[in-house]
């Protein structure tokens, strides 16, 4: 298959003019960063996309950077790739250059190009690569190439937001990469000011690890072309359902069975942080008054929320909904019960989660939160990158808006000395 696909790429890399797209229902823009150890998987996913390609309903645009080859911009058609011209960054043409997919200016140019040249009623941006729970994605092993002006090694959450500035509505922002389905990341997206000229309606991502096979693009594109309801909500839900089905027993994708994918309605995420701040304030007060009881309560609830990927204890992320559910069930404090139940209801209203049976059996609610497993790990946490409590507060407004940073500090503080 790989050899055949390489021949197809060479045979069909035919330039087409700018503005070649028609007004479709959707334009799917795949920022395909294969310039790292995922290069073979990028080839496999291109092959899946070519099974369907662009149609009258759905445009598929891919910026593909491979490990041992320069980058090229393609419109994916059934069985072929067509080279698209005109994409420039800082006045330099991208095609045939060793670009850095970690440079947010490249992402910015790609999104702008897609909206101008392949206009549609709805837009989806797919950031394809590794991801981590601090919101970074798209690592490039040749980020220091002479062509590049940026020194970034990955696209941070803040840089992604800058890249989309002025682009208008992005109906679906999805990450085909690990552990982006975190409440902290979703909360940051609610804080994008209207003055930036961008609006993300749905974040589709996993609180879990994503196997190398990633999304099943042939299934996704087939479904998009057969659906009668092509609203953003319907397509986002389909993405999640297709993913869970692919990795369920007897599914088509290779990878772990303990995976899930979530659809986060950004407009409904905003109330979660202030409600959590009330709860964390209550828990901090409890810790100061009766450390042993409240520490034991929180510890047990955290243990219940160690789902799937956290079973080995080194990921330091837990399922927020499960934590709240367990906190309510275990607490003898009615105020804690009421608040936990209320916030859980907000999560269930804001998040649609598609679980494989293995994750469903553990009750995963689809929204992760950072919760290191020891006081030492607050300063040295494996979160897919280097993380500290200080770094956490710098990256995520959630740390202050939900009182989560100070709550973690109080929970891992020393117990009061006996009087």
Image (spheres, grey):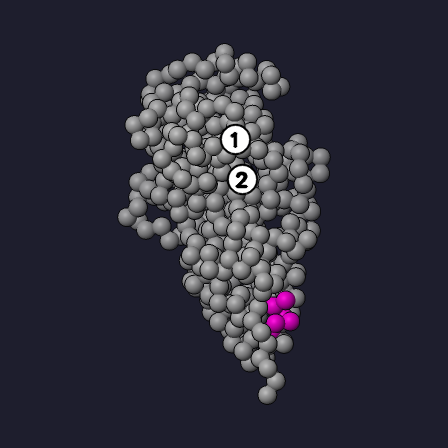
Residue 200 falls inside the magenta stretch = no
For the question of whether residue 269 can be seen, the reply is: no
Magenta segment, prevailing SS (helix, strand or loop): helix
Q: Which residue is mark 1?
A: 34
Q: Give how far apart the Cα atoms at labels 2 and 1 are.
A: 10 Å
Along the line of sight, the residue nearer the viewer: 273 or 395: 395
193 relative to 379 in the view: left or right: left
Q: Earlier in the sequence, mark 2 or mark 1?
A: 1
Q: Whole-percent x and y of residue 323?
A: 60, 61
| Residue 294: quarter of image | bottom right
| Residue most extreme to the bottom | 419
Q: Are marks 2 and 1 in contact (CB under 8 Å)?
A: no
Q: Is residue 30 above or below residue 180?
A: above
Q: Is residue 402 left or right of residue 193?
A: right
**Image position of 320 (left or right of 86):** right
**Callout 2: helix, strand or loop?**
loop
Instruction: Identify the residue shown where x is 63% and y is 76%.
Output: 293
Looking at the image, residue 61 lies above or below residue 362 = above
| Quadrant where the C terminus is found in the figure | bottom right
Residue 91 percent coordinates (x, y) = 29, 27
The residue to which callout 2 is attached is 130
Numbered disc 1: secondary structure: strand
**Residue 81 image offset from top left, x and y in percent:** 48, 18
Q: Which residues are magenta?
A: 294-299
At label 2, counting other C-alpha atoms closer than 10 Å, the crowd grade (few under 14, some 14-19, many 20 or more) is many
């Amino acid at each position: 298959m790989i050899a055949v696909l390489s021949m197809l790429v060479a045979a069909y890399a035919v330039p087409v003019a700018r503005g070649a797209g028609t007004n479709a229902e959707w334009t799917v823009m795949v920022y395909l960063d294969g310039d790292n150890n995922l290069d073979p998987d990028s080839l496999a996913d291109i092959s899946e996309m070519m099974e369907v390609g662009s149609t009258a309903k759905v445009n598929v645009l891919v910026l593909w950077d491979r490990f041992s080859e320069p980058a090229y911009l393609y419109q994916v058609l059934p069985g072929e790739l067509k080279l698209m011209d005109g994409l420039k960054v800082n006045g330099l043409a991208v095609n045939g250059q060793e670009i850095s997919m970690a440079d947010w200016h490249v992402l910015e140019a790609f999104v702008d190009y897609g909206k101008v040249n392949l206009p549609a009623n709805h837009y989806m941006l797919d950031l394809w690569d590794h991801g981590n729970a601090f919101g970074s994605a798209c690592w490039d092993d040749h980020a220091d190439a002479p062509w590049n002006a940026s020194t970034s090694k990955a696209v941070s959450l803040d840089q992604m937001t800058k890249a989309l500035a002025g682009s208008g509505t992005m109906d679906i922002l999805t990450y085909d990469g690990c552990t982006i389905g975190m409440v902290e990341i979703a909360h940051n997206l609610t804080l994008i000011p209207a003055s930036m000229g961008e609006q993300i309606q749905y974040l589709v991502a996993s609180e879990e690890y994503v196997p190398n096979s990633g999304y099943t693009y042939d299934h996704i594109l087939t479904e998009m072309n057969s659906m009668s309801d092509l609203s953003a909500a319907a397509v986002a839900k389909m993405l999640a359902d297709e993913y869970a089905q692919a990795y369920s027993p007897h599914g088509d994708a290779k990878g772990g069975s303990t995976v899930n994918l979530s659809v986060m309605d950004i407009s409904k995420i905003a109330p979660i942080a202030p409600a959590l701040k009330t709860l964390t304030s209550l828990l901090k007060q409890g810790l100061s008054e009766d450390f042993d009881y409240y520490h034991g309560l929180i510890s047990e609830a955290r243990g219940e929320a160690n789902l799937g990927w956290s079973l080995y204890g080194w990921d330091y992320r837990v399922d927020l909904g499960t934590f709240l559910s367990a906190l309510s069930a275990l607490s003898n404090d009615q105020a804690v019960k009421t608040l936990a139940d209320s916030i859980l209801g907000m999560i269930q209203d804001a998040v649609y989660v598609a679980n494989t049976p293995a994750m469903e059996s553990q009750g995963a609610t689809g929204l992760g939160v950072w919760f290191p497993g020891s006081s030492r790990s607050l300063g040295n946490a494996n979160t897919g990158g280097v993380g500290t409590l200080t770094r956490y507060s710098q990256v995520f407004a959630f740390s202050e808006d939900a009182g989560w940073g100070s709550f973690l500090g109080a929970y891992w503080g020393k117990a009061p000395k006996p009087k």
